[in-house]
Image: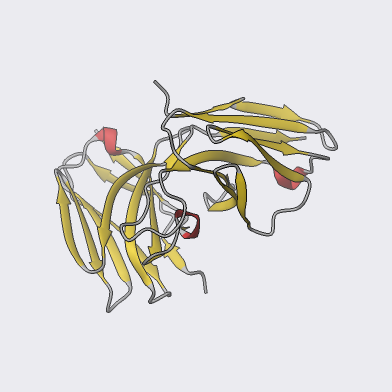
Amino acid sequence: DTAVSQTPKYLVTQMGNDKSIKCEQNLGHDTMYWYKQDSKKFLKIMFSYNNKELIINETVPNRFSPKSPDKAHLNLHINSLELGDSAVYFCASSARGVRSVSGNTIYFGEGSWLTVV
Amino acid sequence: QKEVEQDPGPLSVPEGAIVSLNCTYSNSAFQYFMWYRQYSRKGPELLMYTYSSGNKEDGRFTAQVDKSSKYISLFIRDSQPSDSATYLCAMSARYSSASKIIFGSGTRLSIRP
């Protein structure tokens, strides 16, 4: 059973198109995330959702919009795709998104490889 | 200066060698230190987790934290070809949420049979 699953795994699309990436977790976690990993392997957080509420947005362009229909799902919609959006997008989840004395373990999905041409 | 620095490699060693992977950081508030392993075309998975200074051992893997030098290491003993992956360090301050975890850029490791 895949704990965090996201689709599609590979996506090639033209500039200006709108696309969505879907994510589901079956771990019962309260918090879900979207990360972007660029060609240099830097993982940067884009969004964090805790119980369906957006709790962080790290200066991501508003062309990116997360949608969470319930706490097990967090989809990412991207409007007017640009060449610079080409990257790997990881969905992730954790049990506790807010203050924790023991830290948090983040569980990542397998990634969605987006190529904008 | 980036908050977390990690040599991207690639690092290539023969099977059976001891591997040392390292990260430096600048934020003295960091107290939780993690190592993630990422296989090609896969998502990162948590390998080890330590709090504050000291060592932690798990099988062939040892994580070491030196807070005075702001330096963390991951040692792999008796390295295997299956250890070939990218290793990312990650860290956060005490009481911070998972959304505040900062990742290194990863070191690509290749173990030659």
Given residues A61 and B18, the one toward you in this image is A61
Q: Quadrant of the C terminus of chain A?
A: top right
Residue A50 screen position, x and y as percent: 54, 47
Q: Quadrant of residue A113?
A: top right
Snapshot colouring: secondary structure
Given residues A72 and B84, the one toward you in this image is A72
Q: Which residue is at a point 67% across and 28% down the rendered structure image?
A: A11
Q: Which residue is at a point 22% across and 36% down the rendered structure image?
A: B80
Q: Which residue is at a point 39% across and 65% down the rendered structure image?
A: B95
Lateral position of residue B19 relative to residue A75, left or right: left
Lateral position of residue B43 relative to residue A76, left or right: left
Q: Quadrant of residue B51?
A: bottom left
Q: Quadrant of the N terminus of chain A?
A: top left
Residue B4 screen position, x and y as percent: 44, 65
Q: Which residue is at a point 85% across and 37% down the rendered structure image?
A: A16
Residue A107 screen position, x and y as percent: 42, 40
Task: Kindly tell me whether residue B103 is visible in this rendering.
Answer: no
Task: Kindly tell me whether residue B20 is visible in this rendering.
Answer: yes
Q: Quadrant of residue B69?
A: bottom left
Given residues A32 and B64, the one toward you in this image is A32
Lateral position of residue A78 relative to residue B31, left or right: right
Residue A35 screen position, x and y as percent: 56, 46
Height in image: A21 above or below B55? Answer: above
Outermost residue to the bottom: B68
